[in-house]
Image (cartoon, rainbow, N blue to C red):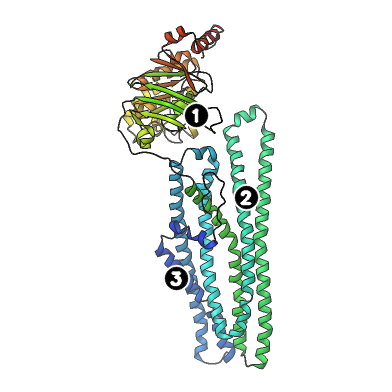
């Protein structure tokens, strides 16, 4: 199918089966040598089919004592079976190579697209949907489609070979066989459309079902704490039941084609038998010719039945592969410029920046922000929840794009930077630490070559050396899924070690010490002080202890900068910051952490 427009309003132009198959040539058509081998082998196997009834004809016409040449029939039959078996093996092997090599190329392209896709894709599609497309849909589609191609080539050639032999024996009778071709074609067309529609619905429902599982795996604590197991089971049951119904409907549509096709074939065969019997009595059709014709005619039913069954795997295979192709066609890569630098100075400027997540009529996340940060300056961003602090942080590495205005790094608009070069200038430590299921060393050196000595130094600077020494394999210990075996403070310090290893000129700290106990926060704060040295630093935080040493505090409210200055200057203004500070002090007097 063709890619849908960005606004989603225009209808997609339906593609014929031939055009849909032609789209796959890029990935599955490049193995020309294997295609040639596979098709040639399938042709050889098909040519052996009519030779079977041809061997029977002389036995019946001349009797079993006709001469030495009749004794060659058993040897010829053995040879035919050997040739056909070898040809089928070669054909199947060749097409398996085509399927797996094409699947590898397409899967590699899809994963590359996931890596460079516009970030909006990740808000529109769930992780389970994307992984299902890249891993399972491509594999299923490739194997189904190429196996169908194997069947089409084998049974198509067999059908042609048998028809040629039937025409050779009696062309008038063979015309009757042609009468069922339109009927078979109509049956396949009707049921193929039905199967394609059911397959698409099944894909969508499978995604939704997988997402329910994904959500409940990630949120198992919340679900159990709130006693939501029954509601989630009902949610799962509803989707699972729908998927079962769709699977049954798909099976019915697929299975109905075979008996209808066989009925058409049996009617044609019965008519042919009646006419052949009449011809054998009045027009000199020999016994051998009659048996050979009927045998070849009966042999037609098997390839016709298998060809009618091809509608199901072809439809399912195309639907699966087109889902991946749609992601390639519709989802564009991130836009980027050409400017790059090895190590930025760290001068950041925002010029009248606005960010709208939904539309112009909605409240802006950022509304006309102007801000200049000097190289090496430590700037803290404070303000009520929803004031735009995290949005501002995410603008810099282009995780969020401005709706208007400019964001500049070292005087160059970030839209003009190459993304790899731009993002190499930033290191981020946030509240939500993400670790890969890999070794500790690989997580610290993420994206770079592992220097073991440097990893050890960064781990030590992050106040994590004592814990790492107690791990079974030290820095070579595999952390597991998102390093859940580590405590919150240890994960934060591991993120700091990663930022130290990256050694970027700009540091982004987004609630890096929230939700930590006092001891963990002390260790993290010590590590952060080492990390911040010599770097331009932006800090989003609520804890007074985190921001009190900043060179400048920027107070945000409703997407705008309300105040900025040092702690003393802001307290003297007696504005929003002073009110937040007073509230924090009252909280501290009650024995709790001072939080802005």
Decide which of tag 2 and tag 1 comes sooner along the chain.
Answer: 2
Q: At which x and y percent is residue 289?
A: 59, 87
Is residue 498 visible in this depiction of the protein?
A: no
Q: Quadrant of residue 537?
A: top left
Find numbered disc 3 in the image and state the secondary structure of the residue it sits on.
helix
Give the spatial CA distance, label 2 vs label 1: 39 Å
Q: Which residue is mark 1?
A: 485
Q: Nearer the viewer, residue 476 or 111?
A: 111
Find numbered disc 2 in the image and state the secondary structure of the residue it sits on.
helix
Q: Which residue is mark 3?
A: 40
Q: Is residue 272 above or below residue 405?
A: below
Is residue 361 visible in this depiction of the protein?
A: yes
| Nearer the camera: disc 1 or disc 3 | 3
Residue at left offset 40%, top offset 19%: 379
Q: At which x and y percent is residue 131?
A: 52, 44
Q: Which residue is mark 2?
A: 201
- For residue 120, side relative to residue 529 (left or right): right
- Disc 1 residue crowd, few under 14, some 14–19, many 20+, Cα 10 Å: few
Decide which of tag 1 and tag 3 comes sooner along the chain.
Answer: 3
Residue at left offset 43%, top offset 19%: 524
- Disc 3 residue crowd, few under 14, some 14–19, many 20+, Cα 10 Å: some
């Amino acid at each position: 199918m063709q890619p849908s427009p960005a606004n989603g309003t225009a209808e997609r132009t339906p593609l014929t089966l031939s055009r849909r198959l032609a789209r796959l040539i890029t990935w599955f058509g490049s193995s020309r040598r294997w295609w040639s081998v596979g098709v040639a082998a399938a042709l050889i196997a098909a040519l052996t089919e009519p030779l079977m009834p041809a061997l029977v004809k002389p036995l019946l016409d001349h009797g079993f004592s006709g001469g030495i040449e009749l004794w060659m029939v058993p040897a010829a039959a053995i040879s035919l079976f050997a040739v056909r078996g070898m040809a089928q093996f070669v054909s199947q092997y060749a097409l398996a190579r085509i399927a797996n090599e094409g699947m590898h190329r397409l899967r590699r392209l899809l994963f590359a697209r996931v890596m460079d896709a516009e970030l909006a894709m990740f808000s529109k599609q769930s992780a389970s949907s994307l992984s299902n497309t890249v891993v399972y849909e491509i594999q299923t589609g490739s194997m189904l489609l190429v196996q169908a191609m194997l069947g089409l080539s084998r049974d198509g050639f067999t059908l042609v070979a048998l028809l040629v032999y039937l025409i050779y024996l009696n062309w008038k009778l063979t015309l009757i066989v042609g009468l069922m071709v339109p009927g078979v074609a109509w049956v396949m067309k009707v049921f193929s459309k039905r199967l394609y529609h059911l397959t698409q619905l099944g894909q969508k429902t499978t995604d939704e079902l997988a997402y329910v599982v994904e959500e409940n795996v990630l949120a198992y604590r919340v679900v159990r704490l709130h006693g939501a197991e029954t509601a989630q089971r009902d949610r799962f049951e509803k989707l699972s039941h729908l998927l079962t119904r769709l699977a049954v409907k798909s099976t019915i549509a697929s299975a109905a084609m075979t008996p209808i096709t066989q009925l058409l074939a049996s009617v044609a065969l019965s008519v042919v038998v009646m006419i052949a019997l009449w011809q054998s009595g009045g027009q000199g059709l020999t016994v051998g010719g009659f048996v050979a014709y009927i045998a070849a005619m009966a042999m037609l039913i098997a390839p016709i039945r298998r060809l009618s069954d091809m509608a199901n795997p072809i439809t399912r295979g195309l639907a699966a592969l087109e889902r991946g192709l749609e992601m390639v066609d519709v989802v564009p890569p991130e836009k980027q410029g050409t400017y790059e630098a090895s190590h930025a100075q760290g001068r950041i400027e925002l010029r009248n920046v606005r960010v709208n997540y939904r539309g112009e009529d909605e409240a802006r996340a950022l509304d006309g922000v102007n801000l200049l940060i000097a190289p090496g300056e430590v700037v803290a961003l404070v303000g009520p929840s929803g004031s735009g602090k995290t949005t501002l942080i995410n603008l810099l590495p282009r995780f969020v794009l401005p709706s208007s205005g400019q964001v500049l790094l070292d005087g160059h608009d970030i839209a003009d930077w190459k993304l790899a070069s731009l993002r190499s200038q930033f290191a981020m430590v946030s509240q939500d630490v993400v670790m890969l299921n890999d070794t500790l060393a690989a997580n610290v050196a993420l994206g770079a070559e592992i220097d073991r000595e440097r990893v050890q130094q960064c781990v030590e600077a992050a106040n994590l050396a004592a814990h790492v020494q107690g791990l079974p394999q030290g820095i070579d210990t595999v952390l597991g899924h998102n390093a859940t075996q580590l405590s919150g403070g240890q994960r934060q310090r591991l993120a700091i070690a990663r930022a130290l290893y990256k050694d970027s000129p700009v540091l982004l700290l987004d609630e890096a010490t929230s939700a930590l106990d006092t001891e963990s926060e002390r260790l993290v704060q010590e590590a952060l002080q080492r990390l911040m040295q010599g770097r331009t630093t932006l800090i989003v935080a609520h804890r007074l202890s985190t921001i009190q040493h900043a060179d400048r505090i920027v107070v945000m409210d409703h997407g705008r900068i309300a105040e900025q200055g040092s702690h003393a200057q802001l307290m003297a203004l007696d504005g929003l910051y002073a009110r937040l500070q007073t509230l924090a002090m009252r909280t501290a007097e009650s024995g709790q952490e001072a939080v802005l």
